Image: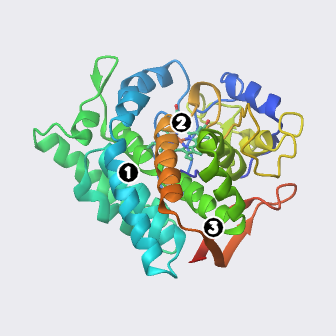
Amino acid sequence: MSVFYPKASKTIVGHKAVREALRDTQTYSSDLQGDSDVRDYRQLPLEVDPPRHHLYRVALAPYFVKPTIELLIPEFRSHTENLIADFFQHGDLEVGQELALPLVMKNLGVIYSRPQDVDEWISWGPDVWTAESEVRDGKVLHRYLDAIYEEALRKSTDDIWSQIAHLEIEGQQISAAEFRGIAGVMLAGGRDTVVKLFTGIMWHFGNKPEDLQLLRSNPELLGPAIQEFLRFFTPLPAMNRTVVPESSTADLPDDRYVGISFISGNFDETVFTNPFEIDFNRGRNPHLSFGFGPHTCLGNHIAEIEAKVFLEALLNSGKNWKVSSEDIRYHQAPYTNVPDHFGAIKIATA
Ligand code: HEM
């Protein structure tokens, strides 16, 4: 998930200040319309404030809780191992498109019990707004959302989209726009973020094979390694809030947006020693990669479990590799050694 907003008039930085701002939903409201170039509905529960926000969270929580996702581990594991074996066998493949994206989409197919849609989701690429197009238009996502909504209302199946289409909030069935907002974020939220995380992991081990060996010899560091990769790569580096809730008035000031920099919290030297180093031995790792407060990522357990299965499969593959070519856009100062966007990353087995 990445949301496009007009430029923020100021940005809140630092671990403490970011956490405080994320808790203070009265001052820093999520009642705002992101991606206004490509959509005219709110992503839910992302773009709504408490107390209504809480109603969406409660309705959606059962799909995202840890015990539900843990039951799916054997299925994740089976296609993860197959994809990794194929990837290494072919050689000279690109990590994002040929490994991370298909893997993450297959996982999503399992989570939402929609294996029949996986090929279509993969064909959209990592960014749903630019699927089939150089410019952002959202056409492909919206065509899909309208089709599944129509199908969910017409057929009496009990699949994920039917359940979502029939969700009731305060006793009222959700609207078509609410369906678009919920299903849209369920498809986009765990897509480019997890793809970036997995590509980053492959890139890091390709550059620093001793870290892969460290995990092979110390499997108890697997959990800390996942948290450290999440911290370092900060797949979603910032989000906006507004100081004037957008549904409160028609007269909206242009300077209402405030950026909340998750990445600044993750590289705050008062919290993380040597933050620019990837270190699996940090102990406590209170990173802000999943945000903080009421909008904390709903898919955090999904991402962590997917990452655990992915890392285990890499360790068990017995393979070592080097990065053979890379195309990376880095963040601006002070995060200049942190990848912001992975273009093509290729590896060669060593
Ligand atoms: C490494 C992977 C991921 C990262 C770094 C990430 C990051 C985030 C962040 C920072 C937020 C908070 C946004 C804010 O405060 O404005 C968020 C919210 C959200 N994420 Fe994720 N996410 C990831 C994976 C996922 C997955 C796998 C899903 C679902 C399949 C998901 C679904 C959501 C949803 C529904 C929200 C909105 C929660 C709310 O507003 O209450 N995310 N995510």
Q: Earlier in the sequence, mark 1 or mark 2?
A: 2
* Residue behind mark 1: 77
Q: Amino acid at mark 1?
A: Arg
- Cβ atoms under marks 2 and 3 closer than 8 Å: no
Mark 2 sits near ligand 1, with its Cβ under 8 Å away: yes
Quadrant housing residue 174: top left
Q: Secondary structure at mark 1?
A: helix
Viewer-closest of 28 and 105 = 105
Viewer-closest of 162 and 88 = 88
Quadrant housing residue 87: bottom left
Mark 3 sits near ligand 1, with its Cβ under 8 Å away: no
Residue 164 in sight here: yes
Residue 137 in sight here: no
Q: Amino acid at mark 3?
A: Phe
Disc 1 from disc 2: Cα separation: 33 Å
Is disc 3 surrounded by few (<14), some (14 to 19) or many (20+) residues within 10 Å?
some
| Residue 13 drawn at (x, y percent) | 82, 39
Q: Earlier in the sequence, mark 1 or mark 3?
A: 1
Q: Amino acid at mark 2?
A: Glu
Q: Earlier in the sequence, mark 2 or mark 3?
A: 2
- Cβ atoms under marks 1 and 3 closer than 8 Å: no
* Residue behind mark 2: 47
Q: Secondary structure at mark 3?
A: strand
Q: Which residue is painted at 65% across and 68% down in the image? A: 206
| Residue 22 drawn at (x, y percent) | 69, 29
Disc 2 from disc 3: Cα separation: 27 Å
Can you say whether 265 is above or below 86 in the image?
above
Viewer-closest of 251 and 184 = 184
